[in-house]
């Protein structure tokens, strides 16, 4: 995972420099790009933080860049910088999933605050995804028998009932149950149920 930072994409050097200075004064790391093409050429799924994207640039526009990022399944929050005439376009991008937009001339403090909020959102999303990935990896490590036993444990059935239903010995159930709890990193059936609760 790369270091979280604001990725500033604007073909106006003066705006890039001013925004970079603003963010650095707030302790927010940033990298600048002078075109959408330059940003996309360095984009990868491990980038973290947020993107600050100018709506109109020479070459590829900010809107085209945004659409390309959506094709790439980028989860980075995007904040658009727009001129007055672009506000209806910017509102449309919010409906397509942009985080926010700012009309030029910018309110520096509001923009810096929203960039921080976008970066915090990205961090929360990545933490949640990592938790889901970890849980999926644990479930994938279970044997077919352990998955069968997990379903019966979650249904509230005791070892003796599980043994009868699966036509195996109580001792075998106990061994599989112990392995199941170990792999899922839980100590009780209640912990297991809470771990697998929908929407957790």
Image: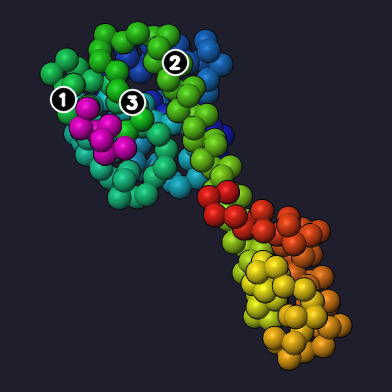
Query: Compared with residue 46, is residue 95 higher up or lower down, i.e. above or below?
Result: above
Crowdedness near tag 3: few (<14), some (14–19) or many (≥20) residues, C-alpha within 10 Å: some
Q: Is residue 10 visible?
A: no
| Residue 4 percent across, percent down from the top left | 53, 32
Look at mark 2 in the image and give the residue it sits on: 112
| Left or right for 162, reference 73 | right
| Residue 194 percent across, percent down from the top left | 66, 53
| Left or right for 107, reference 93 | right
- Indicate whether residue 95 is drawn in magenta: yes
Residues rendered magenta in the picture: 91-97
The numbered mark at residue 72 is none
Look at mark 1 in the image and give the residue it sits on: 88
Name the outermost residue toward the bottom.
167
The numbered mark at residue 100 is 3
Crowdedness near tag 1: few (<14), some (14–19) or many (≥20) residues, C-alpha within 10 Å: few
* Picture quadrant where residue 79 is located: top left
Which is in the foreground here, disc 2 or disc 3?
Answer: 3
Task: Choose the circle earlier in sequence order: 1 or 2.
Answer: 1
Circle 2 sits in a helix, a strand or a loop, which is it? helix
* Picture quadrant where residue 168 is located: bottom right
* Picture quadrant where residue 137 is located: bottom right
Instruction: Name the quadrant of the N terminus.
Output: top right
Q: Nearer the viewer, residue 32 or 117?
A: 117
Circle 1 sits in a helix, a strand or a loop, which is it? helix
- Indicate whether residue 44 is drawn in magenta: no
Magenta stretch, main secondary structure, is: helix
């Amino acid at each position: 995972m790369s270091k979280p930072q604001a990725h500033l994409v604007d073909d106006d050097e003066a705006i890039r420099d001013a925004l970079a200075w603003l963010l650095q004064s707030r302790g927010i790391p940033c990298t600048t790009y002078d075109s959408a093409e330059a940003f996309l050429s360095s984009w990868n799924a491990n980038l973290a933080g947020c993107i600050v994207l100018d709506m109109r640039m020479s070459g590829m526009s900010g809107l085209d860049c945004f659409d390309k990022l959506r094709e790439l399944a980028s989860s980075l929050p995007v904040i658009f910088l727009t001129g007055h005439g672009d506000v209806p376009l910017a509102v449309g991008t919010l409906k397509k999933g942009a985080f926010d937009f700012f009309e030029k001339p910018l309110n520096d403090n509001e923009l810096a605050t929203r960039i921080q909020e976008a970066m915090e959102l990205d961090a929360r999303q990545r933490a949640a995804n990592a938790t889901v990935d970890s849980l999926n990896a644990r479930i994938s490590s279970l044997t077919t028998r352990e998955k069968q036993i997990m379903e019966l444990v979650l249904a509230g059935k005791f070892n003796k009932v599980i043994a009868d239903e699966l036509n195996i010995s109580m001792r075998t159930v106990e061994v599989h149950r112990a392995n199941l709890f170990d792999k899922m990193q839980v100590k009780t059936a209640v912990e297991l149920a809470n771990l697998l609760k929908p929407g957790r």
